[in-house]
Image (cartoon, rainbow, N blue to C red):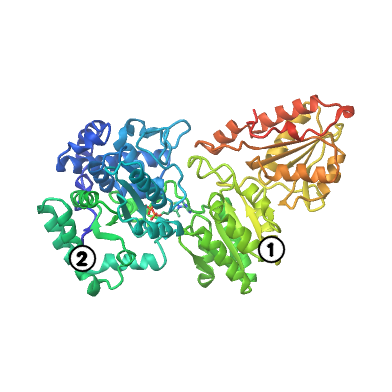
Amino acid sequence: MSLIGDGTRTLGSFGPRSHQARTALKEYAVTLLERINGPADLKELSQDQVTLLAGEIRDLLIETTTRTSGHLGPNLGVVELTIAVHRVFDSPRDKVVFDTGHQAYVHKLLTGRAGQFGTLRQRGGLTGYPSRSESEHDLVENSHASTSLSYADGLAKAYKLRGEPDRTVVAIIGDGALTGGMAWEALNNIAAAKDSRLVVIVNDNGWSYQPTIGGLAEHLAAIRVSQRYENVLDYIKTTLSRAPFGGPLYGALHGAKKGLKDFLQPQVMFEDLGLKYVGPIDGHDERLVEAALRRAKEFGGPVLLHVITRKGLGYPAAEQNTDDRLHQVPAAGAAPGTWSRVFGDEMVSIGARRPDVVAITAAMLYPTGLAQFAAAYPERVYDVGIAEQHAVTSAAGLAMAGLHPVVAIYSTFLNRAFDQTLMDVALHKLPVTLVLDRAGVTGPDGASHHGMWDGSLMQLVPGMKIAAPRDASRVAELLNEAVEVGDGPTVVRFPKGQVGGEVEAIAKLGGMDVLREPAEGLGPDVLLAGAGVMALTGLEIADRLAGHGIGVTVVDPRWTKPVDPALAGAARQHRLVVTVEDNGRTGGFGDAVARLLRDHDVDVPVKTFGLPQEFLAHGTRNEVLEEAGLTPQHLARQITEAVAMRTPGDVRETETSATEDQPVE
Ligand SMILES: Cc1ncc(C[n+]2csc(CCOP(=O)(O)OP(=O)(O)O)c2C)c(N)n1
């Protein structure tokens, strides 16, 4: 018998049922969830109430995320697990770290935020990840994967040193997040910290966005599917449900498993690492999870609990979704008309011409648009798991051996691989192309997901060339130019979402495209260089400024590093230089332009507009841009004022006027 069953066994309210029954249940269930103001209320529920609560949580997850967007599949899979965690541990005294934080919706519902759940991921509403300002139960806001075990290691060590040995730290890590290198660095330390009160829960649903890949995934799958092993665990499960909890029982369970280990699973790697391992257990059997957690809590040292869950459980549209189990709604896949899709399409044609071009994804084949390339050239695409650092250095190896790798990752996750880009790729002048999707403001995923760092980080890398396409044709053009570069790394960065209309150049300025010259009768007042899509914002600004009698030349630099020296000559013809970029202001394209002008002794003031160097909250892309002042209206006003301040006889070096850390208002 499978521990996991057919997906309806443990679900209570999620078996087939009539609309009437569903409505009646919902009325009851809402009452129950409304009574939960925090973990303490949860502890008073009977087992039947827990089952009902799980049902109503699922109803609310489905209703809300299909309306507001959000991570549906992962949260449907952790309902019973999260209930069990909060029934056993005493948050916030005990600490719960989610990895990644997108699995924390159920936690939000159980810690007093059910009433606000309808505002999920909306500007000013609940965030899609844990948030320290939302709740004392939330700890880690960063949702870059594979960090939880390190946080937990540090927390547990600190509580020990501070003389607070009764506090337990719980880390819940997905099987996908467990493929990240940091998780293994942490496990290495956790195994050695024998008296750390730390419970690692591996939430193993077999999926990342797509099925989790690699040797670890195969190992976990082998544990899951072993029929004989499951029979043994059925026996353990029965024993657990009858016996009292405590150290000896943990020992018995552990001993039983360990005794069987050699002939059932010769390489149970967690134990071989020196970690106490319990599992695998059915993560939808709340009572069983609770029992295992209680023993783990009392064990007094680090314990790894391996829990099997089903991503999307209780919602057929998610459970049966073969792309990603509705990891996210709406899907993060490369839909027609998106930047990701345009990139993916071009990769297929490049692949046909260039057998040396290979692609790497860090567990995001569909979202990055590489799925078609994978279908066309399956042997030339590598999914490395959630392992951006490895992805980049592996790309260095591929390049050293004569290939041209294209590493397709989200901009924000490149932060992970900065040293690898700098020292492993650039130092060796290797032809690796980094394609950074979701560059700039991304929207509802908030601070940890805005791609606002790469444009500055990559400026630091010697020999790096950075392309920022403004439209679909430029994605194709610049990607082709990037893979032609044979003596060093390149970046192609573009934003999230749908590509806008095509804008053709009216002239060339060095390697740059001139998109607009001052309107008839207006002088060359402002030279505006807009990076990537901000070139289009520049055109709108030019229209507005023309209405104020200010002539604007708009250029799209195409490559934001190195800055084209032709910009220096053009700057001399104007009264003010303006740069606009969808990236943090510090050290980005604007600063590079200002430096170029200084180096060429161009004495024309420069104003650099970009995102304030802050952690920006969630909202739609337009809302965040509006707040950052990166809209045509705001910018046109700022530029008009800057021009008004200056007369042809009063030009001066005012790079400092673009004051660091001042939001552009
Ligand atoms: C460093 C990093 N790279 C990529 C991502 C994008 N990402 C978000 S969730 C996810 C898959 C997570 O899989 P898993 O940990 O198994 O959790 P599940 O969604 O299956 O519950 C990925 C790749 C990320 N959050 N962090």
Residue type at tag 1? Gly
Q: Position of residue 101 (x, y in %)?
A: 40, 45
Quadrant the N terminus occupies: bottom left
Element type where label 1 sits in the image: loop
Element type where label 2 sits in the image: helix
Q: Position of residue 61 (x, y in %)?
A: 33, 41
Left-right relation of 372 to 648: left
What's the residue at 76%, 44% (across, down)?
593
Within-10-Å neighbours for mark 1: few <14, some 14–19, many 20+: many
Left-right relation of 138 to 553: left
Quadrant the C terminus occupies: top right
Q: Can the viewer see residue 349?
A: yes
Q: Nearer the viewer, residue 244 or 334?
A: 244
Q: Nearer the viewer, residue 510 or 430?
A: 430
Q: Can the viewer see residue 1?
A: no
Q: Earlier in the sequence, mark 1 or mark 2?
A: 2
Q: Position of residue 434 (x, y in %)?
A: 61, 58
What's the residue at 59%, 53% (across, down)?
436
Residue occupied by mark 2: 257
Residue type at tag 2? Lys
Within-10-Å neighbours for mark 2: few <14, some 14–19, many 20+: many
> Contact (CB < 8 A) between labels 1 and 2?
no
Residue occupied by mark 1: 488
What's the residue at 40%, 61% (across, down)?
212
Specify the label residue 278 is tagged with. Answer: none
Disc 1 from disc 2: Cα separation? 52 Å
Residue 29, quarter of picture:
top left
Q: Position of residue 159 (x, y in %)?
A: 34, 43
Left-right relation of 288 to 115: left
